[in-house]
Image (cartoon, grey):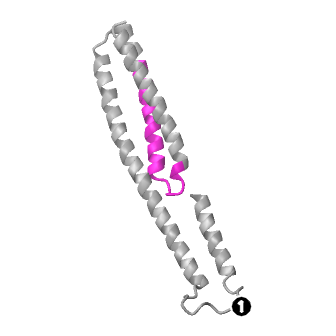
Amino acid sequence: MKYLTFCFLSMGLFLSGCENTNSSAPAPDMKKVTGDEVKKEISEAVKTTKEFTSQKRDEYLIDLKKKIDGMDANIAELETKASKLKDDAKKKWDAKLARLKEQRKKVGTKYDEISESSADAWQELKVGLNSAWADMKKAYVKAVEEFEEKPLD
């Protein structure tokens, strides 16, 4: 995004610098473009690009929020199953659930960072959130597999 903005600005400066280099008169049917018009169009393009990027960030966050809510329901279901365990098995599952909740907390923190980020910065933050999400999902899948194998150890 930063490069795109830089390119637009560079192009505008280049075109405005070249504005008066041609000494011949413009063709009668061609409208002469001024540097101010180029600057205005570039400004509008940058604004449109930021709006588009912001919309994409919002769509990403809405989709991810649905996934997070689903994972929260899955974790709650695991908690319910684990609450029926006794003694050592309960302690073991409480520890696993605590680690899973810690990973969920990291996802929430990354989610909040993106939701509060600028349109320019969210793509960079998205990488961290995707990584945190993948880690939490792996931990959940592993916990479910272990619970189904030996829930009453």
Type of amino acid under label 1 = Ser
Say which residue label 1 marks. Answer: 23
What's the residue at 58%, 88% (across, down)?
32
Say which of 16 and 130 sits in front: 16
Residue 2 found in image quarter: bottom right
What's the residue at 52%, 50% (across, down)?
123
Q: How many marks?
A: 1
Say which of 42 and 113 sits in front: 42
Say which of 149 and 152 sits in front: 149
The quadrant in which the N terminus is found is bottom right
Q: Position of residue 30 (x, y in %)?
A: 55, 88
Q: Position of residue 52 (x, y in %)?
A: 45, 60
Q: Secondary structure at mark 1?
A: loop
Task: Tell me if residue 54 comes above or below residue 88 in the rendering.
Answer: below
Q: Position of residue 70 (x, y in %)?
A: 32, 34
The quadrant in which the C terminus is found is top left
Taken as a whole, is the magenta stretch helix, strand or loop?
helix
What's the residue at 33%, 41% (across, down)?
66
Tell me the magenta residue range. Answer: 95-123
Residue 120 belongs to the span the image colors magenta: yes
Residue 103 belongs to the span the image colors magenta: yes
